[in-house]
Amino acid sequence: MLQTSISQQTGFAHLSDLPCLKLQYGTASAVISLYGAQVLSYQPTAENEVLWLSPKAQWHNQQAIRGGVPVCWPWFGPASAMFNPQNISLPNHGLVRTKLWQVGSQQSSAAGVSVTLTIAVDDLPYFQGSAKLQLCVTLNDSLTLTLSCDSVMPQQAALHSYFAVNNLSSALVRPLPASYHDKVRDVVVDNGSAVATFNAETDRIYHQSAAQLWLEQAEQLLSLCQRGHDATVVWNPWQEKSSKMSDLQLDSYQQFVCVETAHLTTDNQALTLSQQLKRT
Ligand code: BG6
C-alpha cells in the first residue's frame, strides 16, 4: 500500500531553524521551506537528490536561500524602471524569496500529495493594493510546481531551479533555441546549436523555449516540462563570480546548473507558470 504524508518539520540540512513541510509519496519525497515557498529537496527515490542546496545558504537577515527552487516574482533580475518608479533600492529577483508564506490547502491521495502555499503582497512599489500569489507543489511520480497570481498587472516570474550535477563537464541542456541573449557579454548570440554545455560563466536567456527540456548527465536524464513560460534561463556562475558570492564555496559552481522556467514579458496579465521535474 502506497504511503503518503504531509508533515511539518523544523530545519533542513544546516538550516536548523527553518520552518518546512515534508511531502512523502511512496519512496519519493520533497521538502519545502515556508521562507520563500522554496522547494529545497526533491528525491524521486530515497537518497537520490535532484536539487542542489548550497552548504553556505542562509535565511536570516533578508537573505534568499541559495539553492532548491527559488520563486522569483514580480520582477526577474534587477527591478527595471517599470517595477521601480521611485528608483529605490530593491532586491534582485523580486520580493517573495525573503518572505514567510502561509500554508493553504493540502491534499493527499493515491494520485499524489500536494500543498499550496500562499502570500499576500501589499508592498509592491509599482502597484496599489494587495496581490495574492500561490505556489502549488504536487508530488507523485514527478514533482510539479505551479505559481499563479490572478491580479492583472505587469508581473515577471521564474522558477529558478538549481539542479545537482556530479560532473559539470558532461552536463548538457537540450533542446534550446539556437539564439539566446548572453547576459555575461550583453549580446545576442546565434551559435546554431540546440544544446547548452558548461565550460565558462553561463548566463543566458532563451526566448520562446520548448515545452519539454532535458538535463542530461552521465547515466542520468531529467525531464523538465514547462508551461506558461516565454523563456528559459540557463545559469552557472563559474569560478570567479562564485568567489564573490558569500553563500557559495569556491568549487560550488561545479555542483549545480540552474535551468529556470521564466515569464519575462511585462504586459498587464494574470500569471500561471509551471515546471514539472521527472527522472527517467
Ligand atoms: C539568474 C540570473 O537567474 O540568477 C543571474 O540570470 C543571477 O544574472 C542569478 O546572477 C543569481 O541571482 P541571485 O539574486 O540569486 O544572486
Image: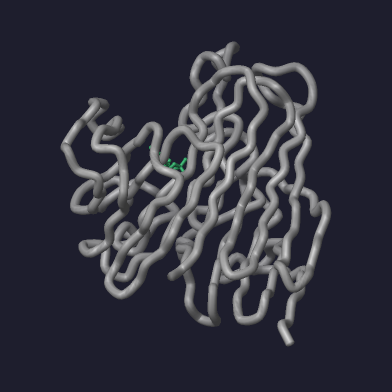
Residue drawn where x is 27% and y is 61% of the image:
171
The answer to whether 255 appears left or right of 25 in the picture is: left
Which image quadrant shows ligand 1?
Answer: top left
Residue farthest to the top, as pictured = 85
* Residue 30 higher or lower than 189, as above or below: below
Q: Which residue is drawn at 27% across and 44% down?
A: 202
Instruction: Classify the position of the C terminus by image quarter.
Output: bottom left
- The location of residue 176, given as percent across then percent down, is 31, 43
Q: Can residue 7 be seen in this view?
A: no
Which percent across, then down, holds residue 24? Answer: 68, 74
Please tell me which residue lies in front, 273 or 85. 273
Figure quadrant of the N terminus? bottom right
Which residue occupies 21% across, 31% down? 189
**In which image quadrant can residue 106 be found?**
bottom right
Q: In the visual, does 271 lie left or right of 121?
A: left
Q: Is residue 215 visible?
A: yes
Identify the residue at image location x=58%, y=12%: 85
Q: Which of 103 and 224 is in front in this view?
A: 224
Q: Residue furthest left?
A: 191
In the rendered view, tell whether residue 269 sits above or below residue 170. above
Q: Is residue 189 left or right of residue 42?
A: left
Q: Is residue 184 above or below residue 101?
A: above
